[in-house]
Amino acid sequence: SLADMGGVYDVARTMSFVLRRKGYEPAIALDGREAIARLTDRPFDVVLMDIAMPGLGGYEATLEIRRLLPNIRILVLTQYDNKEYVLRFLRAGAAGYLVKKAVATEVLSAIRAVARGETYLHAAVAGADDHRARDLLTVQIGAVGRTEVLDQVLALAAEHARVHLRHEGVIEG
C-alpha cells in the first residue's frame, strides 16, 4: 500500500490515479496531521511526502511518522531541489527524495526502489550535474543507445550521492 501525503490536492489526485492504474492502493492526506492519522488507520509500505503542507509540514510529519511507525518508508516528492532539504529529510529518516518534475515512470521506479529498502535520489539532487556525468554523456552518446547512456549517468549520479551522504554522516558504508 502507498500513502500520498501531497500538499496540493490536484497533484495528489493525479498521482493517486496513476498509482491506482499500476496496482497500488493510495490514500491522500492534505496535511501532516491527517497523514499520521491515515497511517494509523491501515498499513502502508511507502509514503509520498510533500515538504510544503498546511499545518504540520512534511519535515515534522516525517519525523513523527518515523518515530511512530519506523518500518514505513518515506519518499519525499516535492518541487524543491535544494540539496540542504535533501540532507535534512534523509537525516530525518526519509528513504528517498524526488522532485515533482520527475515523470510518472520515475516516480514509480522510486516507489519500487524505496519499497525494496533502497535509497532513491532524483538526479537533480544526486549530483547528475557533476562534470563527470556530463563528460560521460558527451563521450558515449554516439557509441551506445540513449537508454544505456541514461542508465550510466544515473548510476554515476547515485554513486556521487552515496559518497556525499557518507561524508555528511547520513548513511554508513
Image (cartoon, rainbow, N blue to C red):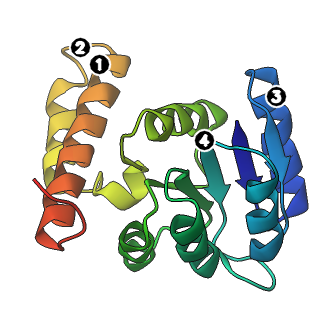
The residue beneath circle 2 is 144
Earlier along the polypeptide chain: callout 1 or callout 3? Answer: 3
Label 3: state its secondary structure. helix
- At mark 2, the secondary structure is loop
Q: Is residue 54 above or below residue 38?
A: below
Indicate the amino acid at tag 3: Arg
Q: Amino acid at mark 2?
A: Val
* Label 2 packing within 10 angstroms: few (<14), some (14-19), many (20+): few
Q: Are marks 4 and 3 in contact (CB under 8 Å)?
A: no
> What residue lies at 16% left-to-right and 36% top-to-bottom?
136
Against 173, residue 22 (above or below) is above
| Residue position for label 4 | 45
Point out residue 41 in the picture as x, y percentages from the top left corner.
82, 53
Q: Is residue 116 left or right of residue 27?
A: left
Which of the two discs, 3 and 2, labels the residue nearer the N terminus? 3
**Residue that badge 3 annotates:** 20
Residue 149 appears left or right of 49:
left
Could you tell me the amino acid type at mark 1?
Glu
Q: Amino acid at mark 4?
A: Asp
- Mark 1 touches mark 2? (CB < 8 Å): yes
Residue 90: name its quadrant. Answer: bottom left
Disc number lying in front (4 or 1)? 4
